[in-house]
Image: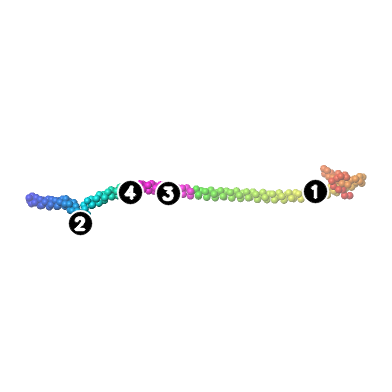
């Protein structure tokens, strides 16, 4: 039984060995085949192998240059991305500050409007109060003017009554005295008394 199992195992290892050998041979022969194909293409093109060597060196040199350019481009792009990131952070900070300023301005504007309304109401109330005071003073002045006019009218009336009384008294007194003293032709009122004379303030009528 064990001998029967050993035979298949040997076959398996033999097959695996053959496959491995074929693959190894393929990898060993492949570069030679590729080289031959390239050489055959060069031969068919009519160019010398040295020309292709030079072209290959130029290509390698160009690849080095392109690699250096790509490296510089990568560095530039990296720095540019870092700068863009910095600008993005700065932009976010600016936007946040702008938002805070806008909010503060809105609150200040709102408070200013409230203060302005309160101040306007205060001055309107003050204006109404002083307008009332002025109206009252004007009414008081009108009343005083009326009282003064009434007092003046009363004074004039009293003055006329006094003048009439003085004239009548002077006529009774001075006309009698004129009989004894013909020079008496006028009179004056001094300390509520009638004084008859020839140089009096009022003309005597007898």
Task: Give me the C-alpha separation between circle 4 and circle 2.
Answer: 40 Å
What range is drawn magenta here? 78-106
Is 177 left or right of 30, judged from the image as shown?
Answer: right
Q: Residues within 10 Å of mark 3 (few under 14, many from 20)?
A: few
Residue annotated with mark 3: 95
Residue situated in front as seen by the camera: 192 or 36: 36
Circles 1, 3 touching at the beta carbon (< 8 Å)? no
Per the picture, the main secondary structure of the magenta-coloured stretch is: helix
Residue position for label 1? 159
Where in the figure is residue 145, as x and y percent of width and height? 71, 50
**What kind of element bears circle 2?**
helix
Element marked by disc 1:
helix
Q: In terms of depth relative to the viewer, which is nearer, 118 or 32?
A: 32
Label 4: which secondary element: helix
Q: Position of residue 56 (x, y in %)?
A: 24, 51
Q: Earlier in the sequence, mark 1 or mark 4?
A: 4
Q: How far apart are the two marked residues, 2 and 3, measured between alpha carbons? A: 69 Å
Q: Which percent across, then down, holds residue 13?
A: 12, 50
Q: Residue furthest top?
A: 191
**Left or right: 112 as drawn, with respect to 195:** left
Q: Is residue 80 magenta?
A: yes
**Residue in the picture at 65% in, 50% down:** 135
How far is the residue under mark 3 from the one under mark 4? 32 Å
- For residue 73, the mark is 4
**In this rendering, which labeled residue sits more in front, label 1 or label 4?**
4
Give the colouring mode of the picture: rainbow
């Amino acid at each position: 039984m064990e001998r029967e199992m050993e035979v298949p195992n040997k076959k398996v290892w033999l097959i695996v060995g053959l496959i491995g050998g074929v693959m190894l041979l393929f990898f060993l022969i492949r570069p030679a085949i590729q080289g031959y194909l390239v050489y055959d293409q060069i031969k068919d093109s009519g160019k010398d192998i040295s020309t292709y060597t030079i072209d290959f060196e130029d290509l390698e040199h160009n690849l080095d240059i392109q690699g250096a350019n790509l490296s510089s481009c990568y560095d530039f792009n990296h720095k540019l991305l870092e700068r863009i990131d910095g600008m993005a952070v700065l932009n976010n900070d600016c936007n946040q500050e702008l938002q805070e300023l806008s909010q503060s301005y809105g609150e200040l504007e709102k408070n200013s409007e409230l203060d302005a309304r309160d101040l306007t109401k205060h001055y309107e109330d003050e204006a109404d109060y002083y307008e009332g005071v002025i109206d009252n003073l004007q009414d008081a002045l009108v009343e005083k003017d009326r009282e003064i006019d009434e007092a003046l009218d009363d004074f004039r009336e009293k003055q006329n009554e006094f003048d009439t009384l003085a004239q009548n008294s002077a006529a009774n007194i001075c006309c009698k005295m004129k009989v004894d003293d013909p020079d008496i032709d006028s009179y004056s009122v001094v300390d509520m008394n009638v004084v008859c004379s020839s140089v009096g303030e009022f003309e005597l009528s007898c």
